Image (spheres, rainbow, N blue to C red):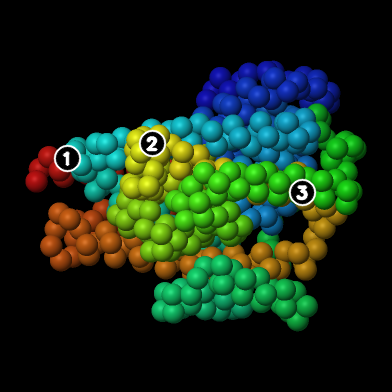
Amino acid sequence: MRALHDADPTPPLETPPAPVSLKQAFWYWLKLGLISFGGPAGQIAIMHHDLVEQKRWISDKRFLHALNYCMVLPGPEAQQLATYIGWLMHRTWGGIIAGVLFVLPSFFMLVLLAWGYMAYGHMPTVAGALYGIKPAVVAIVLFAAYRIGTRALKNRVMWAISALAFVAIFLFKLPFPLIVLTAAGLGFLGARLMPTYFTVGGHGAANQHFGRAMIDDDTPTPAHAKFSWQGMFRVTLTGVALWLLVMVGLYWQFGWQGALTHMGWFFSKASLLTFGGAYAVLPYVYQGAVDHYHWLSATQMMDGLALGETTPGPLIMVVTFVGFVGGWLNQALAAHGPLLAGFLAATVVTFFTFLPSFVFIFSGAPWIENTRDNVRLTAPLSAITAAVVGVILNLALFFAYHVFLQSPWFAGVDWLAIGLAVMAWLALARFKINVIAVIAAYALLGMLVQWLR
């Protein structure tokens, strides 16, 4: 990582850096895709350190401005931020390169991990590692609910929305899209009736200066980034046409009831519901992939989330694992061989999950720049984020039930798993230990427990 941060020395602070070529940007985005561990907070911190403080490709104010707008959109905000900056610097191809390379290394890593899981997951060593990781995942999900809650639940209205969302999904099993739409509607009304309760706190004001940047505070908006209805329509139409082309191809090849066609349709919907991060949409993915389509089991879903925590890129990449396992197990795809079937399914799922993010950036970013500090736009996001806290808490309880009460190793309550989860929570919340370090340590602990059994 040091080599990445120290490369390309910049000129004195009063002089902006020289223009960056698309080739230079390509190598940076590739390196970022390989080291972007730590979830969105860690990924955004890496980009800020590299692009604002060290390379000075973009000013602090412009960086935070782009980030706050990416928060409004559904989808992984760190990946969208990379796409946004790449697009701002080098037009559409710059955005495509930045956005694709942000997730491509993680895609291949997860395909490899999923293959190893399906081919060798029954081996005692692998089973032991997964046993150790699962309590850590429970703690990680609970910690995610805690972190989002401390930021989102600033008043009694937000607490009420969060509680209602939890009751809706825990007791009444209401679908996640309905909860999101209801929360957005409450935010829409709240912006008019009680706007002070629905103001979204951004990532803070830009109050640091790291020297003149290539894209500085006063740098004029480039021509390709200026808003026009014609440009928005053209990009949106291109995105819809691309979506239709692939969906029609899947329908023609596999039929509407084909597993890959269903995956394309389902994850297209899931991609539009990722307000509040990957943890928010995971209950919906679970409802569809496990309960409805039966692409994989609840245990496999848990294992996929555990493996997803160990790779760079956004956590929503866990859908790559879901697709691979679903393709591997699907009887209709067996003629292609399990490995090829899994790879095809993982590719389809990943494509439909991330396509909307690119369309949102390329078509909407110029328009979004005209809506800064508009409470009518941000209030629905505020309500959705509050609802997400309740939904994530439900997800944590679901995982806890399967880990603590349905352990294949211990009858009844698995007190060892509970103790491991408590220690993982303390490691994350009290001692601020990195998620990857916790996952690695717990994998080793699980192997040790397997050896002692």
Label 3: few (<14), some (14–19) or many (≥20) C-alpha neighbours in 10 Å: some
What x and y, as percent, mark residue 359?
71, 47
Residue under pointer 3: 237
- Amino acid carrying label 3: it is Leu
* Label 3 or label 1, whichever comes before in sequence order: 1
Foreground mark, 2 or 1, reads 2
Secondary structure under tag 1 reads: helix
- Amino acid carrying label 1: it is Pro
Secondary structure under tag 2 reads: helix
Residues under numbered marks 2 and 1 in contact, where contact means CB atoms less than 8 Å apart: no
* Label 2 or label 3, whichever comes before in sequence order: 3
**Is residue 430 shown above or below 337?**
below
Q: Tell me the residue at 85%/45% (across/down).
A: 231
Secondary structure under tag 3 reads: helix
Quote the CA–CA distance across marks 2 and 3.
Answer: 33 Å
**What label sits on residue 30 in the rendered view?**
none
Side of 446 relative to 46 (left or right): left
What x and y, as percent, mark residue 113?
36, 36
Residue under pointer 2: 336
Foreground mark, 2 or 3, reads 2
Quote the CA–CA distance across marks 3 and 1.
Answer: 51 Å
Foreground mark, 3 or 1, reads 3
Residues under numbered marks 3 and 1 in contact, where contact means CB atoms less than 8 Å apart: no
* Depth check, front residue: 33 or 382: 33
Residue under pointer 1: 124
* Label 2 or label 1, whichever comes before in sequence order: 1
- Amino acid carrying label 2: it is His
User: Quadrant of the rendered structure where residue 387 is?
Assistant: bottom right
